[in-house]
Image (spheres, rainbow, N blue to C red):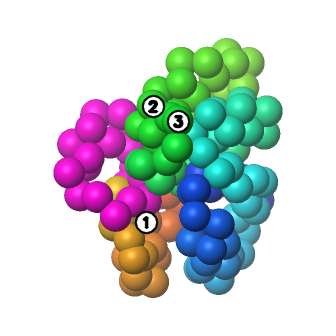
């Protein structure tokens, strides 16, 4: 079964590295888009309706936390559950806010393979219960 994901990351090289690493760890995951900033993440998520969103915290214009709130608020009722959120950031001080937004996980950059593997396992378990 294919699972869809959206990556929101303002640094293109980091976004691509995350996409490649996720593909190696979770071959059934299809990244349906990479958003360069928070507003684009909201727009793409509402159009693509991914099951998972991996969001950077600090992005131009709208933070990942604000984007997650907007996606959840505007998620169409006929689209089922809103996506599961994972925050991928270099800043540890936003973790509490992320978990208040029902984050499945919070991953610090630079992303380590073992840590991302644990995130994938958390996501797979959460999706299995839906």
The answer to which of 111 and 76 lies nearer the viewer is 111
Measured from the top left, where is residue 84 in percent x and y? 52, 44
What residue span does the magenta drawing correspond to? 83-105
Q: Which residue is mark 3?
A: 61
Q: Residue furthest front?
A: 60
The quadrant of the image that shows the C terminus is top right
The residue singled out by tag 1 in the image is 119
For residue 18, the mark is: none
- The residue under label 2 is 66
Disc 2 secondary structure class: helix
Q: Measured from the top left, where is residue 89 in percent x and y? A: 39, 60
Mark before the other along the chain sequence, 3 or 2: 3
Q: CA distance from mark 3 to mark 1?
A: 27 Å
| Residue found at x 65% / y 66% | 12
Give the crowd class for mark 2: few <14, some 14-19, many >=20 residues within 10 Å.
Answer: some
Q: Quadrant of the N terminus?
A: bottom right
* Residue at the image point whose x is 27% and y is 38% from the top: 97
Residue at the image position 45 percent from the left and 83 percent from the top: 113
Residue nearest the observer in this picture, 43 or 117? 43
Q: Earlier in the sequence, mark 2 or mark 1?
A: 2
């Amino acid at each position: 079964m294919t699972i869809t994901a959206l990556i929101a990351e303002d640094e293109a090289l980091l976004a691509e590295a995350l996409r490649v690493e996720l593909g190696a760890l979770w071959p059934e995951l299809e990244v349906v888009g990479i958003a360069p900033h928070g507003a684009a993440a909201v727009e793409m998520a509402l159009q693509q309706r991914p099951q998972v969103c991996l969001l950077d915290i600090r992005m131009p214009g709208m933070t990942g936390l604000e984007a997650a709130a907007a996606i959840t608020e505007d998620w169409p009722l006929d689209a089922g559950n809103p996506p599961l959120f994972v925050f991928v950031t270099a800043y540890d001080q936003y973790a509490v806010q992320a978990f208040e937004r029902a984050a499945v996980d919070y991953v610090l950059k630079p992303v380590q393979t073992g840590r991302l593997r644990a995130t994938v396992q958390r996501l797979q378990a959460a999706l299995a219960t839906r």
